Image (tube, rainbow, N blue to C red):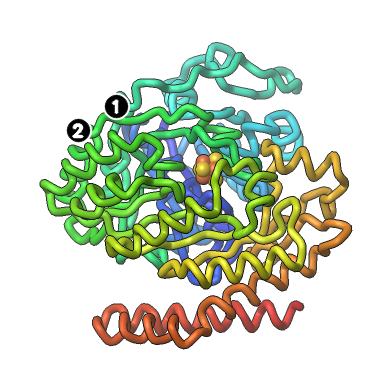
Amino acid sequence: MKTLFLNAPSFDGFDGGAGARYQATREIRSFWYPTWLAQPAAMVPGSRLVDAPARGVSLAEVVRMVEDYELVVMHTSTPSFASDANVAAALKAVNPRLTIGFVGAHVAILPEPSLNAAPAVDFVARHEFDYTIKEVAEGKPLAAIDGLSYRRDGVVVHNRDRALIHNMDELPYVSDVYARDLVPEDYFIGYLKHPYMSLYTGRGCKSRCTFCLWPQTIAGHVYRTRSPKHVADEIRHARALMPQIQEFFFDDDTFTDDAPRAEAIARLLGEQGVTWSCNAKANVRYETLKVMRENGLRLLLVGYETGNQQILHNIKKGMRIEVARRFTEDCHKLGIAIHGTFIVGLPGETRDTIQQTIAFAKEINPHTIQVSIAAPYPGTHLYDQAVENGWLVNDGKTLVANSGFQVSSLSYPHLSQADIFEAVADFYKRFYFRPRKIAAITLEMLASWDMMKRRLREGVEFFRFLRAREGRA
Ligand code: SF4
C-alpha cells in the first residue's frame, strides 16, 4: 500500500511527535526527530514521512497530500489525541478509500476507547509496532497481524500481542528516512548543537520509575540493544548523508544502563571523531564517564527529577541523592555538560520539597535544566495511583492547555494544581537568574556568534514563556 507516516499538525510549536517523551509546547521552541515513525517508514518501501509541526505543514496541505495515498499511519499521544482524531476525520473526508492507523503509547494502552473515539481510524497498533505496520502496508489480512486492534463488522477486535523485537540489528537505519524526508535544520533542542540528529541504539529501560511512559507502554523493561558496530556504522552512514550534522544524540531511555557496551560504542565513535550526547541515569561510574568523554561525549541528559530522597523512593527511581551528587561532580571534573531534568508535583511533593529541589539544582548546577510538571499518562503506575487516590483533575484529561504548554492534571490535599503550575516558572527563575549562571551563559555567547544569536532567540522565547505563565497565574 502506498503509505504516508504522519506527525499531524497540532498546537503552534507543539512537539507531540513520535520522538517526544512528554508531548508539549516547550519554553524554547524544540523538536525531537520522529524516530518512532521513521523506523517503520524505513521498513515500508516507497513510503514517505511527514513531520507537520516541525516543517510547519498545515492541515490543508496534508489534506491535499493524502489524495494519492492508500495508508496513513499517525503517531498520537494523550495530549494530542483529540486533535489527531480530527485530522484523521479530515483526511478520510477527502479520501474515503484511505486506511488510517494510529500508533503510540496512548493507543497501546487504550486501543478500544481510542477506536471508539475516532471513527475515522481503522486500526491501532499496540506496543512495539514496527513489524505490525510493515505487515499492514504489505496488505496482509488485518486478522492475521499480531499487535493490531481494529473494527470488524462494527465491533473492535484485538489480535494477540506482538512479540518484542530482540535482534535490534535487524532494524534498518532511520537515518536513510531522515535524509530522504526530513530537514535536519528543522530540529532544535536548546542544549544540543544545531543541527543535531537523534536516534536509538536500543529500546527499553530496566528501571521502573512510576511516571515514565515508554518503558511501561511500548518498550518494556529489558534494554534491547544494537551491537556497537551496527551503531557506529549508522553514524558513519548518517555523516555521509547529512554532513551538516554537528552532534548525534542517543535517545535510548538510559544509554548508560549497559556500561561496557556504552564504552565500546564510545571507542568506535572516538575513531570517527564524532561529537555525541546521550541520556544517562545519575549513577554512572567515573571510569565509564572518562572513556565516554575521551571519545567525543559532550553532554548527558540526566533525569534527577527531585532533590528529595523520599520522593525518589516514592517514584521508584532507584537512585540516591549522594550518588547523583557524586556523579555530577565527576561530570564537572571531566568537562561533561549536563542538561538536568526535574519534575514538580510527584507523589509526596510539598511546598518544602519543591524548595529543596530548587536548592539541590542550584547546588549541583547542571549546565542547563528542564522543569516539567508531573504528568500522569494512562498506562503508567502514576496514573493508576492518581486514580486510586483521587489526585486527578478533570479525570486527567487536561495535560496541556490550548497553547500546548503543560498544565498540572494532579492536585493533592496539601499541594494544589496551581501551586504545582506556579512552581515551574519560580524554579526556572531561581536557577537561571543567578550571577554565576548569567556569567556562564554570557561567556558562552561571547565565545561564538552562532551561540550569541541562538541564546538571544531562546532568551526572547523564554521571557515570553515566563510572561505567559505570570499572565495565567
Ligand atoms: S531511568 Fe529514566 S528512562 Fe528509565 S524508567 Fe526511569 S525515568 Fe524512565
Left or right of residue 30: residue 126: right
Instruction: Please give the residue where the numbered disc 2 appears in the rendered image.
Output: 229
> Residue 294, can we see it?
yes
Please state the horizontal and vertical placement of residue 117, each as a whole percent of the image.
75, 39
Amino acid identity at mark 2: Lys
Q: Is residue 312 above or below residue 70?
A: below
Which quarter of the rendered picture does the N terminus lie within? top left
Left or right of residue 352: residue 221: left
| Alpha-carbon span between mark 1 and mark 2 | 10 Å
N-terminal label among 1 and 2:
1
Please state the horizontal and vertical placement of residue 28, each as a whole percent of the image.
50, 71
**Most distant residue in the top direction:** 144
Left or right of residue 463: residue 120: right
- The residue located at (86%, 44%) in the rendering is 389
Instruction: Please give the residue where the numbered disc 1 appears in the rendered image.
Output: 169
Q: Is residue 468 above or below residue 265?
A: below
> Residue 57, can we see it?
no
> Which of 193 and 35 lies nearest the eye of the viewer?
193
Which quarter of the rendered picture does the C terminus lie within? bottom right
Please state the horizontal and vertical placement of residue 177, each as a whole percent of the image.
31, 43
Please state the horizontal and vertical placement of residue 442, each as a whole percent of the image.
36, 86
- The residue located at (39%, 21%) in the rendering is 166
Sort mark 2 into few (<14), some (14-19) or many (20+) by Cα contacts within 10 Å: some
Between circles 1 and 2, the one closer to the viewer is 2
- The residue located at (74%, 78%) in the rendering is 472
Residue 191 picture quarter: bottom left
The residue tagged with tag 1: helix, strand or loop? helix
> Which of 66 and 191 lies nearest the eye of the viewer?
191
Q: Which mark is residue 178?
A: none
